[in-house]
Structures are given as C-alpha cells and as structure tokens.
Amino acid sequence: MRPDGIEARYHPYYCEENIWHLCGEPALAAQQREAVIITNSTRSVLLFGQRAAGAGGYVVWDYHVVMLARDGTSPWQVWDLDCTAGHPLAAAEWLRTSFPLGPRLPPVYAPRFRRMPADRYRAMLHTDRRHMRAPDGAFLHPPPPWPAIGTGSNLVQLLDFSDPTFGPFADIAHLARALDTGSPA
C-alpha cells in the first residue's frame, strides 16, 4: 500500500500535527483516509509499542492520533508514526501491537476512537500548541519546526465526548469490527 515518495513529517509529542500533515500527503491522495482520535473520559489511554514507551513498555497518553488508509475496498492500514512496529500496519496488527491486553485493559485506560475523514480533519483542526505549555508558558516538549496549524485551538473540543461536532466515539471492539468489515465506526 505504501507508495514511494511518502515523507511523513514527524515530531515527537505532536501526533495531531503529524497526522494532519500526513492526511494531506499528495502521494496518499488517491486512497481513502481517515484521522482517528484516541482518548477516553479520564484522558489516560494505555498504548504499547510506542516510541516514548521504550522497548517492550507502554505509555499513557492523554490522547493519540493516527491515520487509517486503504485503496478502494482493500483492508484498512494504520499509520501510527509513533509505533515502534513501523507504519503502515494492517489494522488488526496495529490493534494487537498497541492494545495487547484487549478487553482485559482496566476501564480507566480503555481507549475510545473517533474517526473523521482526512479532509475534514485537516479543515477543522486548529492548534496553537497551548496544550503543550506549562503554567509558566514554557513548552513541555520542544515544538515542531513548522508553523502551528490555524489560529487558536479546538483540541479540547476534538477530545470532548459530549461534543458531536467531530463525530461519535467508539470502543475498541466496535472499531475492530468496523475496520474488519469496512463499515464506519
């Protein structure tokens, strides 16, 4: 599935921006693409196989963003630029790598997934990176070298379960079924 010439912009700790850029990658324009926002009500999602986790470990993110892509009716593949297993991965493989505990995951860490068409994600995301600043204004992690996306920030709205603007959230079982069958979550 991966066409030659894809140069995904990547900067650690800025997954929403990395995926925003990937969703606009010209070499992927012919594919069906969706951004997937991963979070939960406690803002503590446990993921394995992430660069920030170290070898064999896990990390707890307040949220994470990946991209789904496929050609026509081919199986979905996941572009998780933070995944140590590489990208893209078959959706089932990415789910096993990132969430190996499956239903045994404690509810406080259970992920919820919001899928959005890539073009809509690119049109709607605005982030001035305020969520990455400490109370004194210093960055918690160095920002990417590219300009911030849009003006202001709607990231809180994007992660809000009660706000339907960006679409509904699904649990991991629902997402796995949807990716297997090709239906929307």
Image: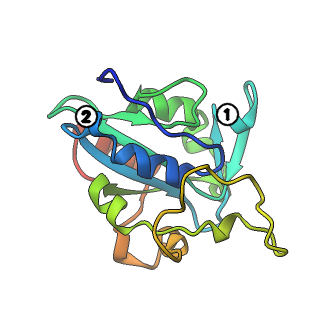
Earlier residue among tags 2 and 1? 1
Q: Secondary structure at mark 2?
A: strand
Q: Amino acid at mark 2?
A: Arg
Quadrant into which the N terminus falls: top left
x and y percentages locating residue 154 in the rendered image = 49, 74
The foreground one among 67 and 104 is: 67
Provide the secondary structure element on which disc 1 rests.
helix
Question: What's the mark number on residue 51?
Answer: 1
Question: Which residue corresponds to the image point at 35% horizontal and 59% vertical from the top-left?
Answer: 122
Position of residue 73 relative to residue 170, above or below, is above
Return the residue at label 2: 70
In the rendered view, tell whether residue 97 sits above or below residue 118.
Answer: above
Instruction: List the single residue furthest toward the left.
Output: 72
Q: Quadrant of the C terminus?
A: bottom left
Q: Nearer the viewer, residue 150 or 38?
A: 150
Q: Amino acid at mark 1?
A: Arg
Question: In the picture, residue 42 is in which quadrant?
Answer: bottom right
Closer-to-camera residue (171/104):
171
